[in-house]
Amino acid sequence: MRRNKLIVLLSAITIATTLVACQNTQAQTATETSQVQSQQSPPAKPGGEGFGGSDQVTQGDAATNLTTDATVTGETYESTGDDENALRVTGATVTLDGVTVNKTAGATSNTENGDFYGMNAGFLATDGATVTIKNATVNTTAQNGNGVFSYGSVTTVNVSDTTITTTKDNSGGIQTTGGAAMNATNLTVNTAGNSSAAIRTDRGGGTVVIDKGNYTSTGYNSPAVYSTAKVTVKNATLNAENSEALVIEGQNSITLENTNVTGNMSSTEGALQTTTYTM
């Protein structure tokens, strides 16, 4: 009888242990699933806008749109319109020497169409354009007014010895998306708005190569480099006065060579911690 009672007691303990183990396994599985789902959710961009916008390429209008091959010297291009580029090059090979591009007003109807496709930027190259910009000045004072924007998988912008200044939120200095290429040499780039990286990429990424120059952001959540692409920076100075210096989203990269990097990261827009590197 005692043997039977012992067997029954051991059986009860075994069943209880099994139930606890199953419950622990289910809890662990639920935790792991939650962690995987969390890892798969795309991170928010600087400023917390996240993802969205139109899946269809939406670029708005252009005050001037160059669609045939040309060399332009010393011209000034202006825009004050909503969802409008001051200057756009569409599918053409164009050289711009000593030009001035001013985007001084004009509201954006969708910030992420500006971030992804170049709507409301000062300058936009798109649809396979190849554009060389040198000795130029680009100024934007409109919200979502990115300075020089390269969009699309066969679009290339080569920009050198140029000054780019943006003052409002969501306004990067140079922006590359949709698999485009951006080659920048000896630029002076200053951005003042929030969520306005000096060197910026977004949906679809691309290839960005920076050689020489000074790239400074002063807004919050505005790194010197924000990468959703393959970005290489050499012989340059990167300075983020109110943000982390470098941000890499997803499986992308930033390669630095002989470059000075300074960041001031703060989540509260209060006390800042300064970090400086030479790479």
Image (cartoon, helix red, strand yellow):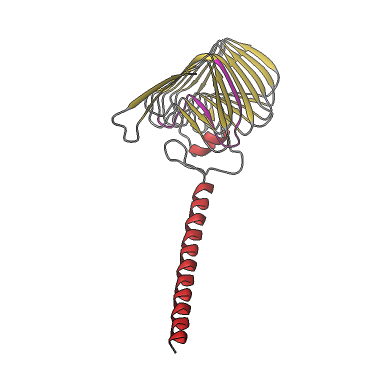
Answer yes or no: is residue 148 visible.
Answer: yes
Where, by quadrant of the figure, is residue 65 drawn?
A: top right
Residue at x 47% of width, y 82% of height: 7
| Image quarter in which the N terminus is found | bottom left
Of residues 58 and 223, the one drawn nearer to the viewer in this rendering: 223
126 left or right, relative to 4: right
Residue at x 47% of width, y 41% of height: 44
**Furthest residue toward left:** 271
Of residues 243 and 189, the one drawn nearer to the viewer in this rendering: 243
Of residues 32 and 54, the one drawn nearer to the viewer in this rendering: 32
- The residue segment tinted magenta is 194-211
Answer yes or no: is residue 189 visible.
Answer: no
Residue at x 44% of width, y 35% of height: 46
Q: Position of residue 2 (x, y in %)?
A: 43, 86
Q: Position of residue 22 (x, y in %)?
A: 49, 68
Q: Position of residue 52 (x, y in %)?
A: 52, 44
Where, by quadrant of the figure, is residue 257 drawn?
A: top right
Q: How many marks?
A: 0
Residue at x 49% of width, y 52% of height: 35
**Furthest residue toward bottom:** 1
Q: Is residue 202 magenta?
A: yes
Q: Is residue 21 magenta?
A: no
Instruction: Answer above or below: position of 33 versus 15.
Output: above
Instruction: Answer above or below: position of 78 versus 98.
Output: below
Q: Position of residue 242 (x, y in %)?
A: 37, 27
